[in-house]
Amino acid sequence: PLRPTSSFRTRHRNSTDMEHLELNAVIGYAGSVVDGIFLLPDNRSMVYALGSTVVKRDIVDPKNQQFLQGHSDKVTCMALSPSGRLLASGQVTHLGFQADIIVWDMETLQIVHRLRLHKVRVESVAFSCNEKWLASIGGQDDNSLVVWNLETGKAVCGSPAANETCHTVKFARRNEFVIVTAGKLHMRVWDFDLANRKVRPVDCNLGKLQRSFKYLLVDEADEYCYAGTSTGDVLKVNLRTKLFKHVGPKTRLSQGVAAMAWLAGGRMLVGAGDGTVAVMDSESLKVERSVTLDGAGAITALALHASRQVVFVGTGACSTYLVKTESLEAELRSTCHPSRIHDVVFPVCACYNILYFKNAISSSIAL
């Protein structure tokens, strides 16, 4: 009978060993994920996406890391519940397959629910104020809104999100039955009717304005929703009347608004596509001050510390910065390759503990 050669047995044994490799530490951050960084309530830990893994690490000691592994492909969106007890992460998968949403317990780091309904990609997720419900939006191959029961892990109801592509979803801050979605040329406020298991949309009246929306921020009183656009301005819309009220700033932020967060005193922190971080007045929508992080790419995440004095900023170039909210003084905290790594090599001399990484696009080499 034919017997496997020694080289075949060696290759097979090595491949089996590879499947059981345990992840020990990571260097990097997925800057393409909007809201890809969150600070946990203990103010000592942060979570962020990296490939198919969600990383929890100590803010002061980057080597103190824990890993949430359960996705089969890249994480595309994340949301942290208001209490910080739960984290939801969505992924992309192959054409024709359903993409997972995983709800994690942030104390035990275990999977609470695996939710599967959207086709190909999960675009955005959001928790309700009381953490009973999770809203999710599918990617362009799906484009549906689904509301999930977080006690049972079952879908309550769903609906096509819009005729055009939907990009983002948010719950109201105080009302568990109000949901806001937005995307290309539309912004909708949904009534979540639990008794009849329905979601009913009302299109916001934006007048003659035509915008593609990238980010939503609801105020504390659920009176207004602020929508960041791909053209670099912010629209202020009344959630009760669904009427557009104001747009600003007069000089638009370059390359769109991709991230927003609340500061004290009715001010907003806004991140733009050209690497600009700006402080904006929520009433007048005027920029009070700003700073541009050179070479950072688009601002994709703004994770405020509980003190509101500093913010962790994530960028499309896969770098993270610590920015003071008053002076906007920025400090680079981490950086890595923004695209695929083609090669990794140890130097010939084993006395140096150095790894060389060769980047795919820019052909840069990092040590």
Image: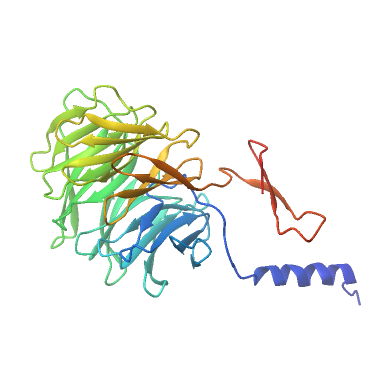
Against 283, residue 101 (above or below) is below
Tell me residue 154's x, y (percent). 30, 67
Tell me residue 8's x, y (percent). 84, 68
Tell me residue 147's x, y (percent). 26, 58
Tell me residue 124's x, y (percent). 35, 50
Q: Which quadrant is home to the N terminus?
A: bottom right
Total of numbered circles in the picture? 0
Against 93, residue 271 (above or below) is above
Which residue is pictured at 26% across the width and 26% down the height? Answer: 210
The answer to whether residue 278 is left or right of residue 7 is left
The answer to whether residue 167 is left or right of residue 172 is right
Residue sitting at the far bottom: 1
Which residue is pictured at 70% across the width and 55% down the height? Answer: 354
> Residue 195, can we see it?
yes
How is this picture coloured? Answer: rainbow
The answer to whether residue 194 is left or right of residue 144 is left
Against 118, residue 1 (above or below) is below
